[in-house]
Image (tube, rainbow, N blue to C red):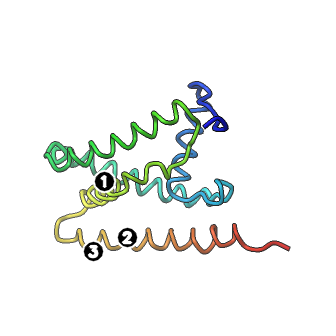
Amino acid sequence: MQDQQRFPGLSPEYLRDFLTISFHSFWAQFGWMGVVAPPRLYLAWGGLMLVAAAGLVLNRRRLIEPTWRLLLGTLAAAVLAFVGYNLAFEQLQGRYLFPALTPIAILLVAGWAAWLPARTQATGLLLVAGLLVALNAYALLRVLALGFAPTG
């Protein structure tokens, strides 16, 4: 690990880069971090995450149940490992949070569901899933494919 860039020390710039690059690369940043999605895609993913987070806050009493505490603990362990590694080496890649994909997905769905009446939750969540499929298809076809298209 001699060639890995070391943690440069905490600064506003490092914190900004840590949050931005980690978020971007969790959702869509390809090709050795050189193929970045348009800002509007990150805004859409971020907006969906904020809606889910607000839904979790609205329904926070549920989060004290043992099952939810286990999910939150798993997510916290992955985030702490990610942050801890980045305090030694600068490796701002959201893919290192992929071990927590299951708790992240469950918490996102629970947050979105909190906004919907019980009778419309299935339909509402299918609509959100459809939106995510559309965003990801766009990222695949218009970002990833173009990022690796032959030039010249």
Q: Residue furthest right?
A: 152
Q: Residue at x 86, y 74 (%)?
A: 152
- Image coordinates of residue 68 in percent, x first then y, are 20, 48
Query: Pointer 3: what residue?
Result: 123
Looking at marks 3 and 2 on the same chain, the residue that comes earlier in the sequence is marked by 3
- Tell me the amino acid under the disc marked 3: Thr
* Residue 79 horizontal side relative to residue 16, left or right: left
Which marked residue is nearer to the observer: mark 3 or mark 2?
2
Q: Residue at x 29, y 70 (%)?
A: 124
Which numbered tag is attached to residue 129? 2
- Tell me the amino acid under the disc marked 2: Ala
- Tell me the amino acid under the disc marked 1: Pro
| Alpha carbon separation for disc pair 3 and 2 | 10 Å
Q: Residue at x 30, y 60 (%)?
A: 109
Pointers 3 and 2 in contact (C-beta within 8 Å): no
Pointers 1 and 3 in contact (C-beta within 8 Å): no
